[in-house]
Image (cartoon, rainbow, N blue to C red):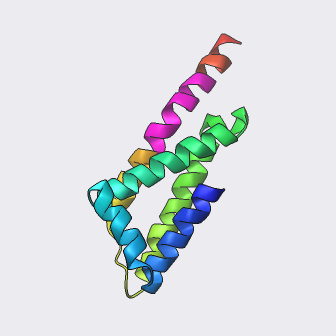
Amino acid sequence: MGWLAFIVILSASKSLGYGHWAWGSIEHFLGGNLQMHFVFAFILSALAHLASSRFWHRGWLLLLLVIGCALDEGLQFVFPLRSFNPMDFLVTCAGLLLAALPFMVLQWRQVKSC
């Protein structure tokens, strides 16, 4: 929950034009906007899967995370300081999926062996 709150606060501050020193520094440190989207999404997905029950590893958690990120990216149409970039969303989805993949494979193997 802490990581999710951090990402939401960072996104909101960027949307409202505050905290450039924070999100700008993180973006620069990670090598750019796309790298930041990938790393944050990967960590979010990994932590969410580690914290959730096996039911959610069947793909439901990944779907929920993708919908949440789509809403966040979609809100960028509303804020004048932000702009929607489909590549940001695709890179975010790649990070979410890559981190979720081991959990989903393990869940699939357990279901298959039963």
**Stretch in magenta:** 96-107
Q: Looking at the magenta stretch, what is its main secondary structure?
A: helix
Q: Find residue 30 and report its image quarter.
A: bottom left
Residue visible at 34% across and 77% down? 83
Q: Residue furthest left?
A: 31
In the picture provided, is 62 more to the left or to the right than 80?
right
Residue visible at 34% across and 71% down? 24
Say which quadrant the N terminus sits in. Answer: bottom right
Q: Is residue 19 above or below residue 99?
A: below
Q: Position of residue 76 (x, y in %)?
A: 43, 77
Nearer-the-camera pick, 98 or 20 = 20
Residue visible at 61% across and 40% down? 49
Q: Is residue 44 above or below residue 85?
A: above
Nearer-the-camera pick, 90 or 26 = 26
Q: Is residue 39 magenta?
A: no
Q: Is residue 104 above or below residue 19?
A: above
Q: Position of residue 91 (x, y in %)?
A: 35, 52
Q: Is residue 87 visible?
A: no
Q: Position of residue 3 (x, y in %)?
A: 58, 56
Q: Is residue 40 visible?
A: yes
